[in-house]
Image (tube, rainbow, N blue to C red):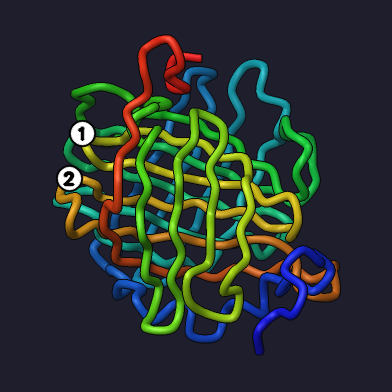
């Protein structure tokens, strides 16, 4: 049912209202990590041990110096998506604390990783309902090579069409290092648009983690997208936030096929990428 007054944010769909059919273009879960242990070590010396089975991951968090998070260990169901040769995008929603969810980018070729922790409320920096923390690390069991994941301005100026199903399509306009605009072109949110906070990290040349944090709906997302072929983009992602009641955490994965619609090149003096 279309929304009659697009400016009435109280009528916008809650996160769980978007889910049915939104995941039609999701990739298959990969079991490539089953039987593997990946210990992530960051600059503080914090170690997170992950032991993967086919659909379950056991993990142990051992804080390093100056890390206020206490020692924790638990297990969760997970989904893994193959992004590129040796590159995996892993999602899990904590059972012991449903207000937190984790996205991992594991590069088995370079021995590097990027963790994105999402939290409803909590002490992470930011003012949105769902906050995100980005932590690059190395994989202890592997030889480290190449460069670490880092913030990127690669997307600034691009306008991209993303198709999540035959019924759901959105365009993204990447305005600058911290902001993007989205507009729904097809689906139950057709006609809606907004500008929200975002972050971009490059994990391999042309492969980017793009995340956003919405201010109207209490939700956030982490995606990873292969932008190397601008006519055939591919992304994998997760949405995390609160349901229509405003109390129950909701977590689901999705995928999208995309294409570059246009690219804005600003004069150097006005380039948002260098602001």
Q: Are marks 2 and 1 in contact (CB under 8 Å)?
A: yes
Which of these two is toward me, 35 or 168? Answer: 168
Q: Which residue is mark 1?
A: 205
200 horizontally vs 32: left or right? right
Q: Residue at x 72, y 30 (%)?
A: 125
Instruction: Tell me the crowding category of disc 1: few under 14, some 14 to 19, or many 20 or more residues within 10 angstroms, Cα based.
Output: few
Residue 1 screen position, x and y as percent: 66, 89
> What's the CA distance linking mark 2 and mark 1?
8 Å
Identify the residue at horizontal 72%, vertical 34% (top origin).
124
Snapshot quadrant of residue 8: bottom right
Which residue is disc 2 drawn over?
228
Residue 36 located left or right of residue 17: left
Residue 139 seen in this snapshot: no
Label count reads: 2
Mark 2: give few (<14), some (14-19) or many (20+) Cα within 10 Å.
Answer: few
Classify residue 240 by image quadrant: bottom right
Residue shown at 34% from the left, 49% from the top: 37
- Where residue 161 appears, as percent x and y from the top left, is 36, 60
Per the image, label 1 sits on a secondary structure element best described as loop
The residue sitting at 29% across, 66% down in the picture is 257
């Amino acid at each position: 049912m279309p929304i009659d007054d697009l400016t009435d944010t109280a009528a916008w769909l809650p996160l769980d209202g978007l889910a049915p059919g939104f995941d039609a273009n999701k990739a298959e879960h990969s079991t490539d990590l089953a039987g593997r242990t990946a210990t992530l070590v960051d600059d503080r010396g914090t170690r997170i041990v992950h032991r993967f089975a086919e659909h379950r991951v056991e993990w142990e968090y051992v804080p390093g110096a100056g890390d206020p998070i206490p020692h924790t260990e638990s297990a969760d169901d997970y989904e893994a998506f193959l992004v590129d040769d040796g590159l995996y995008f892993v999602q899990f929603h904590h059972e012991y604390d449903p207000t937190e969810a984790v996205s991992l980018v594991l590069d088995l070729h370079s021995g590097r990783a990027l963790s994105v922790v999402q939290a409803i409320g909590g002490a992470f920096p930011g003012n949105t309902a769902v906050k995100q923390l980005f932590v690059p690390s190395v994989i202890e069991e592997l030889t480290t090579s190449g460069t670490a994941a880092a913030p990127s301005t690669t997307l600034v100026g691009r306008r991209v069409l993303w198709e999540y199903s035959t019924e759901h399509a959105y365009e993204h306009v990447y305005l600058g290092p911290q902001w993007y605009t989205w507009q729904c072109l097809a689906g139950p949110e057709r006609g809606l648009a907004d500008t929200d906070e975002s972050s971009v990290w490059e994990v391999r040349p042309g492969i980017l983690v793009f995340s956003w944090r919405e201010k109207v709906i209490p939700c956030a997302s982490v995606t990873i997208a292969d932008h190397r072929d601008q006519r055939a983009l591919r992304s994998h992602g997760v949405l995390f936030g609160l349901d229509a009641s405003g109390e129950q955490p909701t977590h689901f994965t999705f995928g999208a096929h995309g294409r570059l619609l246009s690219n804005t090149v600003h004069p150097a003096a006005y380039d948002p990428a260098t602001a």
